[in-house]
Image: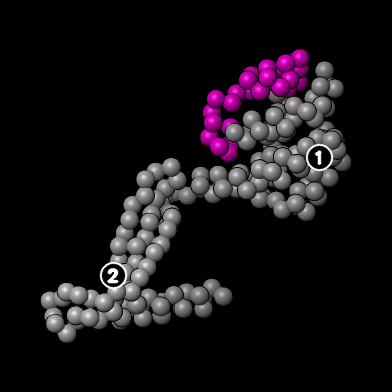
Amino acid sequence: MAGELESCKPLSGLLSGLAQDAFYGHPGITEELLRSQLYPDVPIEEFRPFQAKMRGILKSIASADMDFNQLEAFLTAQTKKQGGITSDQAAVISKFWKSHKTKIRESLMNQSRWDSGLRGLSWRVDGKSQSRHSAEIHTPVAIMELEIGKSGQESEFLCLEFDEIKVNQVLKKLSEIFRDHS
């Protein structure tokens, strides 16, 4: 039975299933489903620790957002460790991470946001055509439109209008922020 766990063909499917459950929010991917579809001849008492090991490895790689050099070092260490993984399994994990890294990272970023994020920004400069005071007519104004929303939800739009003084104040504040964080 242990030989079947050594087989790398179903490992890619297991990793995909674990990623679906852990990172993409598909709760229908159960331990029994994965075992029956990918390792039907392996008893549950052998499959459970193997699945836990693969889940742990995948979560370690994802939480560290490993680049490919870090990944190779990590997987090499896993192959040398007692009760670790085989070099064939390491190759499957490496191939899986190389093709899924961006999508998993995006999913983790979206899950970690508590509030809305900025989805888009557009701006333009117009001449003011109406005002309570005639001296303000034809003065330049900056109009900025922010698209704000959470992933999977409809966006909200916020429109801001700045006169020259406000634009200068915003630019000054931005330059202070950049200076303090450089």
Q: Residue at x 69, y 29 (%)?
A: 14
Q: Mark 2 and mark 1: span between their CA atoms?
A: 55 Å
* Front position in the image: 77 or 106: 106
Residue 41 coordinates in the image, percent (x, y): 76, 14
Residue 110 coordinates in the image, percent (x, y): 51, 47
The kind of residue tagged 1 is Ala
Q: Quadrant of the C terminus?
A: bottom right
**Residue 128 visible from this viewpoint:** yes
The kind of residue tagged 2 is Glu
Q: Earlier in the sequence, mark 2 or mark 1?
A: 1
Q: Is residue 17 magenta?
A: no
* Front position in the image: 60 or 146: 146
Residue 79 coordinates in the image, percent (x, y): 84, 39
What residue span does the magenta drawing correspond to?
A: 21-47
In the depicted structure, whether residue 168 falls above or below residue 65: below
Q: Residue at x 81, y 40 (%)?
A: 91
Q: Is 93 on the left-hand or right-hand side of 65?
A: right
**Of circles 2 and 1, which is in front?**
2
* Front position in the image: 11 or 75: 11
Q: Is 112 on the left-hand or right-hand side of 153?
A: right
Tag 1 residue: 91
Neighbor class of circle 2 (other Cα within 10 Å; few <14, some 14-19, many 20+) is some
* Front position in the image: 63 or 166: 166
Tag 2 residue: 161
The secondary element bearing badge 2 is classed as: strand
